[in-house]
Amino acid sequence: MSAFKKLKSTDAFVTTYVAKKSWNITGSSFDSYNIQSIGILSSSDEYEYLNPAFNYGPAESGISNQGDYNQKIAYRSINQLYYKNYNKDNGSILDPYFYNLATGSTSAPISNFTSSKLFENYEQSTLTYVEGVHSSGSRYLRDYGIVYSLPRSIIGTHIEPNTLKLNPGANIGIYYNSTASIIDDGDGILLLSESNSVTNVGNVIYTHGIAIITDTKVAQKFRNEPLLESIEFKSNQPIFTYNYHCKISDYEYNHTQNPTALSGSDNKLRNNVSGSDFNPYITSVGLYNDAQELIAVGKLSQPLRKPSDTELTVQIKLDI
């Protein structure tokens, strides 16, 4: 009897589930988790960003926990990725219908609706929000903002909507008569958690791990004291489970190969294991590759008696 049994293709398959982990990362630990915070700044000169003198480090930008970067290039990157289809004054989507709905006008400047502005801006909701119609929905990118970037290693596939919370430090001070935390509304909008005076202070792109504070007053407060007390959120990490069904027929593995079962110089089976009533016990199952190299061992919680009159299936699960 062979010591190995080859699995059929139908005996091995992969299943997945998503683990949602809660995080509460303090500002002093941002470096450890590679969380970046940067300031972004608009520029009136289209070519000003080409000048290396406009590079900003931690001292110039007022943002700690970063290397050197260019605020204007960062601003244009954020604008291109997430805001290009929106009117920066009222936050409406650059479509004549939604623009007029937000402004109450009957016409809109045709320059606002050029084809060059039709980009994928990574909408976080299937709903179309317009400022004045749904007060928490539009996207603004004013001349200054703060961006917090959470790496893929901690967010997994995305940040779980309705779980992001930016907790300001005690030194940030009051903005809009509030010292409230900033939370997401589940549709990609950042709101003050304890104030109705300002309903939209930024955006979160769940799939990218990007939180953008676009409200100028709030962003300025965060710039002066950029180290948050903490960031709270839930990550979504897919877990891949490899399932192996090891099927054993009634006539297989009914004898032991343990050397202690042999006796004498001729290595005969001991009397207590040679009778017809003897059944070995299974305590572990080894998985081997085609080169017969051991790659994993599954341990049973307790020894399992191998029946000699019926089939047996041992299921092994490996989470990776």
Image: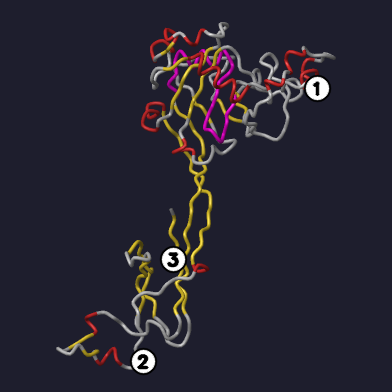
Secondary element at image label 1: helix
**Left or right: 72, with 57 as reference point:** right
Pick whichever, 52 or 309, lies toward us.
52
Q: Which residue is mark 1?
A: 97
Q: Which residue is mark 3?
A: 316
Residue 130 appears at what percent x and percent y? 73, 23
Residue 93 appears at what percent x and percent y? 72, 23
User: Identity of the amino acid at label 1?
Assistant: Tyr
Q: CA distance from mark 3 to mark 2?
A: 28 Å
Secondary element at image label 2: loop
Q: Which residue is mark 2?
A: 277
Vertical placement of residue 277 versus 229, above or below: below
- Quarter of the image with the N terminus in it: bottom left
User: Bounds of the magenta span?
Assistant: 203-228
Residue count near mark 1 (Cα–Cα under 10 Å), binned few <14, some 14–19, many ≥20: some
Vertical placement of residue 55 versus 265, above or below: above
The reply to whether dot 3 and dot 1 touch (C-beta < 8 Å) is no
Pick whichever, 242 or 134, lies toward us.
242
User: Identity of the amino acid at label 2?
Assistant: Asp
Does residue 222 show up magenta in the picture? yes
Q: Residue at x 44, y 56 (%)?
A: 319
Q: Earlier in the sequence, mark 3 or mark 1?
A: 1
Q: Residue at x 68, y 13 (%)?
A: 89
Residue count near mark 2 (Cα–Cα under 10 Å), binned few <14, some 14–19, many ≥20: few
